Structures are given as structure tokens and as C-alpha cells.
Image (tube, rainbow, N blue to C red):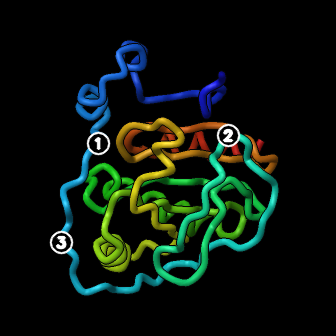
Amino acid sequence: MRSPLSATRVRKLPVALLLAGSLVAAALTLGACSSSPAPPDGVPTTADTAPCPRGQGREVSELPRLTLDCLTGPGTVAISRLHGKPEIINIWASWCAPCREEMPMLERAHHRLGDRVQFLGVDVKDSRSAAQSFLTKHGIGYAQVFDSHGDLPLRLRLQGVPNTLFVDASGNVVDRVIGRLDDQSLAEGISRLQR
């Protein structure tokens, strides 16, 4: 049986690490976060984020049929459905340092690309208030959903966060980056969306 995303190219992960499948080594090599301390629940804040995408567009066969609640407003999002345009799906958590480092870069790309690409953050294994506070403090404005149990990375067999998926307008996952994005890996993923 073909594993999810098996046809996509995995960058930033040495071949030996793929074979070994060592979560500890992955975290050390990539700077990825693999477990979450229990962040304290503070006073919830509402980030000024874009509304969650609406609609039930083309199905993305490589993504699980999973519906998640919007993080900062009402509604839900069907993860396995496109929402009328190519998508960049970033899986993150407020307690993850590499996630926090890459988010301003994603926000700049979101502003630069405007309505041509749907950006969607998937906050996993986090507290809603900690995630909302982070988004507000750092001015992150693209749409966000909340995955408190980490169902999306579990179903995709992804270990740790961050992870970023690039889905073209035809519903194909054309690239993914395991670990923290940099300018080059983000630019390459966006380029694949526009082919």
C-alpha cells in the first residue's frame, strides 16, 4: 500500500534518517519539535487572521478526510478539499521554536501572493489560547485551523513539526518540506505550485 505523499520529494532529511526513522535524530537534524510541553492556558486572545477558507472544491487524494475547527473564528475546514486555488499548508505549534522562526516568512509570502495562493496554518497539539496569543503578538494574518490531538500529522505519518505541504490547483501535493522552511525551500515550493 502506498504511503501518503510517497510521490512527493522530501527535502532537508538525510536518506539514512529516512531509513532509520529515528524521531530523536530527526529532531536533532532538522531542529524539528517532536513533543509538546503543556503550555499554560492564559486569557484567550483573538488574532486578526483571515477567515477560514470556505467551499468544497477538488479533493486532494493524498490528504486525509479530516475536518478541523477554525482557530480564531467560527467554522470548519475540510483539509482534503481545495478551496479554489493552490494551497500552502503549514503544520505548526506555538511551543515549537522552528515553527515560530518560519512564520514571519510565511506571512510575508502570504502578503506578496495575495489571493493567488491559499495559506492555511494547522496548529497541532497546542492550547488554543497559546496559539491565538502567538498569532496576535507576531501579526500572523493567514487562515488557521486547530488540531488539538495532532490528527493531521498522525494520518500523514509525519513526526514532529513543522511540516509544509504545497498543493497545486489540480489537487496534487507537489512538494513538502519536513522541518523549518527557509527562503529557498519556500520559493521552490511556490514555483512548483505555479507550473
Relative depth, front residue between 112 and 170? 170
Residue 103 in view (yes/no): no
Relative depth, front residue between 94 and 112? 94
Q: Position of residue 182 (x, y in %)?
A: 42, 44
Relative depth, front residue between 104 and 149? 149
Kindly identify the amino acid type of the residue bearing the numbered disc 1.
Ser
Mark identifier at residue 34: 1
Kindly identify the amino acid type of the residue bearing the numbered disc 2.
Glu
List the residue tagged with mark 3. 40
- Relative to 168, is 179 on the left or the right? left
Q: CA distance from mark 3 to mark 2?
A: 34 Å
- The part of the image, by quadrant, that contains residue 24 is top left
Label 3 residue SS: loop
Label 2 residue SS: loop
Kindly identify the amino acid type of the residue bearing the numbered disc 3.
Pro
Task: Residue at 80%, 61% (x, y): give it.
Answer: 57
Mark identifier at residue 111: none
